[in-house]
Image (tube, coloured by chain):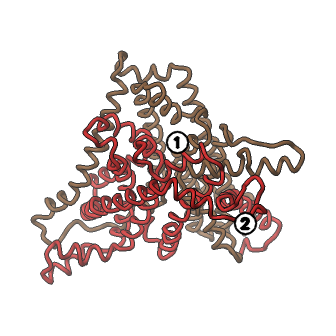
Chain colours: A red, B brown
């Protein structure tokens, strides 16, 4: 197709200009905020010099939120792996109306706004023991929200390989179910599991809609702290905090893009 | 707001044969046992609370009609209508922008192409709060746009803390994933159709209007519905920009926290959930692409 439209007339340059403009809209504020987080005084501009002072300030004030977010993200990953991978296997082995219905139901926490899910959790479990003030309350919300992504990523890979034949082969050699599951099924799905895991970690670290209602003053996550700092502190600190957030999610974003390029297994 | 992914339609995945060989006798039981933990967590922490929320929405003096009378409140109705208008506008603009850019990127290859695609899809996983901050960077009190308009002598243009800022934020959030959808669909187009149209003498704009856009229609409807649902339900961006912006998620939040009007908050969020869920159901049925959104 490109040979036809590659004449590079004015149409090409016009469209290139437009696309670059869109790209600028997306990237310029990112770069501005990263620079602002490293600038001594944003009002004065870059000539006031670069500094790590604001990043240190963020660490001093908000390290708790960063660590809590990491803890919740990895706990959430563990839960979605334990719940989602077996569920995906069950759905892949018995495709049909029921599997589709289950899949549809599991997607619901993503389809309806996090605000609604959080309200529902609060009115139902807000009064149960110490759950409301525990970080586990946030974890529950994150697991609901990220589980569908794990299930879908794994299911997509399971659908693209011939699981039945692989398992039959292993079974004919005398492998029991657990052995087949751990030595045949899981290794063959690792690209989906990896893609799903990266997605779960990234989403959990950045989750705000549910978390804002579920958090308490003692269980503040990174995005909650971000909202806090945007509202009340100087722009350099908000920017430095955003920079820290970028540093946390960029590795997994890059990995996800690389995975997607390499054969587009899922996500 | 939350990130979401385009998956391939799972309903069209290569058929997995019905279980044949291994351990056939205990199989259904085993599969049920594997599904059970996820199902139990889901039922206990999602379905049950959701039913509870629906009942609370109807738990006031008016019973089930509360779902209708909530909307009789002019403030609520106003908020619903402005959210619908905002989401429709965001969807239209995002679709237009992303179709132009996405088609261009699929049909032309040039040095730096991969980098451009990577940059355009990078903000995919940004949470709403961060998107809000990006809008402040662009259009806030110390933002880029204000600085430019001031330098041009037109006074400082600041619109971050209003509906316009929210509009910019949602477009910002939606562009990456719509571009991805458009590109994926455009890569599957049959170049021969276009060549045929050209060889029959169709002008370039006719080729776009009569060949390319109709072929992209399912992808555009699906991406549009996703974008609409996300804009309806998003909370983080509005929260960062200004709590005064009159969109439904902010109204729900205010009813719940400041007014402690839990019944109204429940009714409105059930309503909002129905809208986003329906929009995504449209997306799925049209394109077979099940996509995740909202939040």
Q: Which mark is residue B200?
A: 2
Image quadrant assignment for residue B197: bottom right
**Residue visible at 65% across and 54% down in the picture:** A236
Residue furthest right in the image: B153
The picture places residue B173, in percent across and down from the top left corner, at 59, 52
Q: Looking at the image, is mark 2 or mark 1 earlier in the sequence?
A: 2
The picture places residue B133, in percent across and down from the top left corner, at 62, 50
Residue furthest bottom in the image: A173
Circle 2 marks a residue in which chain? B
Q: Is residue A105 left or right of residue B237?
A: left
Query: Is A104 in front, or is B47?
Result: B47
Residues at circles 2 and 1 in contact by the CB criterion of under 8 Å? no
Q: Secondary structure at mark 2?
A: loop
**Could you tell me how many numbered marks the image carries?**
2
The picture places residue A79, in percent across and down from the top left corner, at 30, 59
For disc 1, the marked residue is B235
Q: Does A214 appear above or below B251?
A: below
Q: Secondary structure at mark 1?
A: loop
Q: Can residue A104 be seen by looking at this rendering?
A: no
Q: Does B278 appear above or below A204?
A: above
**Residue visible at 42% across and 49% down in the picture:** A110
Circle 1 marks a residue in which chain? B
Query: Is B289 in front, or is A54?
Result: A54
């Amino acid at each position: 197709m490109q040979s036809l439209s590659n004449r590079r007339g004015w149409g090409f340059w016009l469209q290139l200009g437009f696309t670059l403009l869109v790209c600028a809209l997306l990237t310029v504020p990112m770069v501005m905020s990263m620079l602002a987080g490293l600038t001594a005084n944003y009002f004065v501009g870059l000539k006031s010099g670069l500094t790590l002072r604001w990043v240190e300030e963020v660490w001093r004030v908000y390290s708790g939120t960063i660590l809590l977010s990491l803890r919740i993200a990895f706990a959430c990953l563990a839960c979605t792996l334990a719940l989602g991978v077996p569920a995906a296997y069950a759905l892949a082995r018995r495709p049909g109306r029921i599997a589709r219905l289950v899949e549809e139901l599991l997607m619901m926490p993503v389809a309806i706004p996090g605000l609604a899910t959080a309200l529902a959790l609060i009115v139902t479990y807000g009064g149960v023991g110490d759950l409301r003030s525990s970080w586990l309350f946030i974890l529950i919300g994150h697991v609901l929200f990220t589980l569908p992504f794990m299930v879908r990523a794994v299911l997509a890979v399971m659908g693209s390989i011939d699981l039945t034949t692989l398992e039959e082969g292993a079974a004919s050699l005398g492998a029991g179910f657990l052995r087949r599951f751990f030595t045949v099924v899981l290794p063959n799905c690792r690209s989906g599991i990896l893609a799903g895991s990266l997605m779960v970690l990234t989403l959990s670290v950045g989750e705000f809609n549910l978390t804002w209602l579920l958090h308490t003053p003692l269980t503040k996550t990174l995005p909650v702290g971000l909202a806090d700092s945007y509202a009340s502190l100087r722009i350099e600190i908000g920017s430095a905090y955003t920079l820290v957030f970028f540093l946390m999610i960029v590795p997994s974003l890059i990995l996800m893009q690389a995975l997607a390029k390499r054969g587009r297994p899922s996500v | 707001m939350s990130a979401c992914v385009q998956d391939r339609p799972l309903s069209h995945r290569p058929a997995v044969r019905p279980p044949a060989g291994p351990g056939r006798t205990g199989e259904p039981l085993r599969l049920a046992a594997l599904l059970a933990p996820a199902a139990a967590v889901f039922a206990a922490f999602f379905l049950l609370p959701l039913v509870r929320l629906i009942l609370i929405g109807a738990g006031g003096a008016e019973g089930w009609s509360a779902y209708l009378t909530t909307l009789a409140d002019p403030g609520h109705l106003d908020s619903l209508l402005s959210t619908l208008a905002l989401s429709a506008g965001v969807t239209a603009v995002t679709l237009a922008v992303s179709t132009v850019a996405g088609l261009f990127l699929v049909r032309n290859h040039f040095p730096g192409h991969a980098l451009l695609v990577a940059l355009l899809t990078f903000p995919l996983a940004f949470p709403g709060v961060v998107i809000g901050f990006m809008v402040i960077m662009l259009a806030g009190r110390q933002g880029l746009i204000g600085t430019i308009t001031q330098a041009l002598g037109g006074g400082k243009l600041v619109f971050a803390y209003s509906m316009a800022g929210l509009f910019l934020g949602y477009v910002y959030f939606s562009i990456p994933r719509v571009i991805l959808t458009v590109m994926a669909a455009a890569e599957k187009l049959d170049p021969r159709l276009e060549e045929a149209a050209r060889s029959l003498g169709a002008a370039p704009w006719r080729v776009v209007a009569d060949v390319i856009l109709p072929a992209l229609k399912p992808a555009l409807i699906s991406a549009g519905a996703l974008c609409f649902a996300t804009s309806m339900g998003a909370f983080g961006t509005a929260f960062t920009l200004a709590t005064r912006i009159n969109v439904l998620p902010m109204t729900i939040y205010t009813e719940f926290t400041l007014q402690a009007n839990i019944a109204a908050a429940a009714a409105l969020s059930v309503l909002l959930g129905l809208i986003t869920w329906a929009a995504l159901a449209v997306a799925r049925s049209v394109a077979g692409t099940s996509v995740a959104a909202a939040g």
